[in-house]
Amino acid sequence: MHNDIKEILFTTEQIEAKAAELAKQLEIDYADKKPILLGLLKGSIPFIGDLMKHMNIPVQIEFMDVSSYHGGTTSSGQVKILKDLDTSVENRHIIIVEDIVDTGFTLDKVIALLKHRGAASVEVVTMLDKPEGRVVVMEPKYIGFNIPKAFVVGYGLDYDEYYRNLPYVGILKEEVYMN
Ligand SMILES: O=P(O)(O)OC[C@H]1O[C@H](OP(=O)(O)OP(=O)(O)O)[C@H](O)[C@@H]1O
Ligand code: HPA
Ligand SMILES: [Mg+2]
């Protein structure tokens, strides 16, 4: 285990099994809908990779780069779109892929934008949900695991752009970001 990690919450094996399980549910629900899997960069990179390889239906993969944490452990509340979609979402079924839902600010903004652009439906699949972090109402339809109110890293999740490459999800030691 990395020296900056206090506790591992989910191992690689647990995460990969959960991704496969979620993919099978999406396969059933979107069998004839030709959905767009929309990954929000950068955190969703490992999860969208694990998810898509278990979805044996026609699916389009797209990305938006959205950011609001700017290197800290709390949301700035300002959700910036650093790279927008370059494909139309009109009349398309969108599955937003997230690593984590915390305050809900990111999804609130992205969902409103996609609906405004005429998406036929918008749902969210997230590997992690931190319900105690919520500031705006947000209920993702597909959730991998619920987590307590702690700052976590790994499996795409960063602190100040590092730790995304850890193959597990763990709680970051507070001393790493307190000084
Ligand atoms: O529910 P929220 O409080 O909005 O938090 C969730 C979002 O925050 C993180 O993104 P971040 O802004 O750190 O960008 P990143 O994916 O590039 O790390 C995470 O990847 C989610 O997209
Ligand atoms: O707990 C978290 N860790 C990393 N990034 C995040 N973005 C929202 N919550 C978190
Ligand atoms: Mg981040």
Image (cartoon, helix red, strand yellow):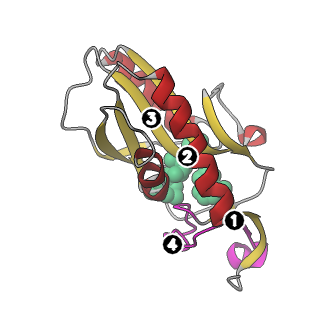
Give the crowd class for mark 2: few <14, some 14-19, many >=20 residues within 10 Å: some
Asked if the magenta segment contains residue 9, the reply would be no
- Which circle's residue, 2 or 3, is located before the other in the chain? 2
**Image location (x, y in percent) of residue 1:** 71, 82
Q: CA distance from mark 3 to mark 1?
A: 23 Å
Which residue is depicted at the point 37% across and 38% down? 38
Q: Which mark is residue 20?
A: 2
Which of pointers 2 and 1 indicates the residue nearer the eye?
A: 2
Q: Quadrant of the C terminus?
A: bottom right
Q: Which mark is residue 165?
A: 4
Q: Which mark is residue 11?
A: 1
Q: CA distance from mark 4 to mark 2?
A: 20 Å
Q: Secondary structure at mark 3?
A: strand
Q: Secondary structure at mark 2?
A: helix
Q: CA distance from mark 4 to mark 3?
A: 21 Å
Main secondary-structure element of the magenta-colored stretch? loop
